[in-house]
Image (spheres, coloured by chain):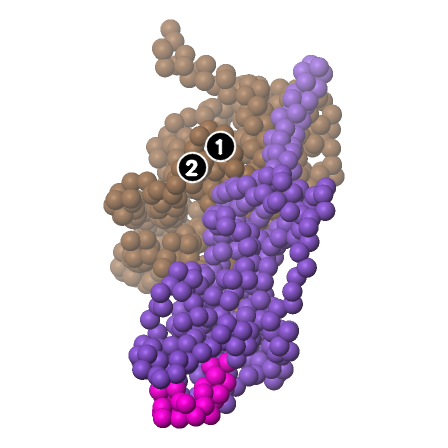
Amino acid sequence: MKTRSMVLRTRGMNLLKKRGWQVALSTVMLAGLAFTAVAGWVGTPIGSRNFAIAFVWIGWFAALIILLIPIFGRGWCSICPIPMVGDWVQRGAVLEPQGRPPRGLGLRVPSLLRNMWTQNAAFALLALFSASILTSPRITAAALVGMFVLATGLSLVFENRAFCRYVCPMGGFIGLYSQVAPIELRVAAREKCTACQTKDCYNGSASGYGCPWGVFPTSLTRNNYCGLCLECLRTCPNDNLAIRVRPVAADLYVPSTRSDEAFKSLIMLGSAMVYAAVLLGPWTAFKFAAFGIGSLAWLVNAAVFLVLVLGLLPGSLWLVGRLSQRLTPSAEGTQANPSARGRSPFAAFATPLVPLGLAFWAAFSLTFFLTNGSYVLSSISDPLGLGWNLIGTAGVGWQPILAGAIAPLQTAVLVGGFIWAAGVARRVTERLQLPSLPLIGFLFLPTVVMLWLLL
Amino acid sequence: MRLREHAARLAILIVVAAAALIPLAAWLRTPLVHARMAESGGWGPDVLHARAGVPLLVRLTSDDVVHGFAVGQSDAPPVDVLPGKVSQTWVEFDQPGTYTFYCTRWCGPNHWRMRGVIEVEGSETAHAVPASPPLFQVLGIDLDLPHPAAATPSAHPDAQRGRALAGRLEKPIDLNLDEYRAQSPAAVWQKWRTDRGLAGLSDQDLWDLVAYTYASQINTADRSEAAQLYAANCAACHGQRGDGQGVFADALTQNNLDMGGTSDMSPATGPVRPVDFTDPASMLGASPALLHGKILRGGMGTGMPMWGAILTDPQIWNLAAFLYTFQFDEEPVS
């Protein structure tokens, strides 16, 4: 006899397997993208009054960081409009497979680029121009259209979603922090996959498309490379895939060994600090430098940013790894513990930066949203700044939300993030049989800096 | 199946096209006058069209900072133009012609460059009033040459003292309007210095008399209006105290340097720094006709804009009279 919760689960999974809702939502998002691009390009250049800035960067971005990623992980990617047209062109269909071979050149991404380095570079590049992107509607519109064109173009050249998997800076951001989400898409029984002859989840079938992320679902151990496109739910002939609820941050139980992923964590962490300093800090010189694209001050600013995220932070983490190895108690311990010898456990030590980085971004976004959230209301009512009042909120003036609660909330988020990260650090170091104090100390320093920057 | 696919494609196309085209069409059908700092282009468009006797709705928005919109030589109050918001005002003109609209807020170093015109057409021919040439032209004053005072006082002339002195004179001093407008204070002082009837007065006494005489040329109400005009339109460069140290003074000099000029330009065009009205050598050598001409026409090759299209002739004369207050300690004359 089925229990009520099992029935609900089954109904929920059946709903997820249907394609119509996803295409409908993606279409709405695509329409939103088109609207945002037009609003950004022709609407008022005053960021706080333009939908492209007020809604996207104040509303959507805060919702993404504070709610969507921590709860749904890569849920946004499942309806993201950026790769949709590329997908549809590649497939030659918007709904079920038409039985045609994929359109476009269908090349494999060169092995040299099949990693996160391009994505890291894209995010770092975006960060260099972030002050302008986050405040200029036209630059936001251009960036969104540029990403859309690039994603569509890459779909015509390479197989699958090359843009999402290897290039998209936002995808990298979402993927990294989706590891903490309490949901995951995984196979139910690996033996069924082993026995499966057709591997429809990877190759596609009449029911759905092969994984557009080029992932073989059986090999999924973490959320970051699964875009939750849900195609495998539709194609699996054995009904062996499901979206499950799991313990928070379960992906971090096994530390990463990839340096590209470690650098991604460090770039995100450093970017949050730089954003906080430039956009929320009191230093006008920083702001002018960040806005003055091409100026000497901007070049210095860019150099400082790159040195921080590609040199200082990674170098410090590497040294912390080395220090931990040196502090391993005895010669016997060193002999018995391979982690205490050889290369610095740099990549594994970056694992606790995931919860810490998410806390940094959440604290930054809280300020951004609570301080500027009132602009969202006016921009919805008059998205282009043409004097409209569609929902009667165009005249809403700037008013901080819960102004008195911002500092306590930020403190709670940052301290909570540090405690969470310290717990992950302990787990990582215990697994490697290394002392945890150096790593926890490394996590403590940027937390203090971020507290100082935001409070 | 094929039908469903085609229907889906069509629906997607319609929804996405609508999302892009509806705001685009709305934008095209909503003409706005965009205000931007002069460095970013000023008014856009900077030429508006109207018909005489037909009210024109002007909808304005600012693309950067707070600006103000007003039409020159008009009594209509200025309208604030706020960033990202839309303000609107009605303007109406009785006569065909070209009218100047301008920014009323100190929006940036080149604020005074934010000008535009409203071209007003009319079916009937306006009764054109033949314009008389400005006095500086009639007098043959070269506005672009320096006019230093031949004599300057050793202390600040005091109009109140001059008034008391004038009351004690056996023969009342006399300076009619034409003489006042045509002569600089220094020229009047020199003329009186050679007057035997005033030979018993000291040089400073005579300067006090000059101060009193010039202060008498403007009444309290006009002087108050002129003070407001000065604060709104002149103080940004010339300074609230008339010392040439307004908030934009340095930026104007820098602008000139950026354009390849020198900080003092050529002798023909005068210094590009705003004129210091507290300097006796230049101010006491300037006649009201010269000041009127400078305000009316503006300074050639300097940052001084022409105000003839914006201020009325009486306003300019009052403003010229007001400028002497930076030289003379004077009380309003009622």
Q: From this view, report whether residue A220 is shown above or below residue B165.
A: above
Tag 2 subunit: A
Tag 1 subunit: A
**Which residue corresponds to the image point at 44% horizontal and 51% vertical from the top-left?**
A268
User: Chain B colour?
Assistant: purple
Q: Which mark is residue B241?
A: none
**Dots 2, 1 in contact, CB < 8 A:** yes
In the rendered image, which residue does mark 2 sit on? A395
Magenta stretch: includes residue A220: no
Position of A426 compared to B253: left or right? left
Prevailing secondary structure of the magenta residues:
helix
User: Chain A colour?
Assistant: brown
> Residue A31, position in %: x, y?
59, 31
Is residue A95 among what the camera can see?
Answer: yes
Name the image quarter holding the N terminus of chain A: top left
In the rendered image, which residue does mark 1 sit on? A389
**Neighbours of disc 1 within 10 Å: few (<14), some (14-19), many (20+):** some
Q: Earlier in the sequence, mark 2 or mark 1?
A: 1
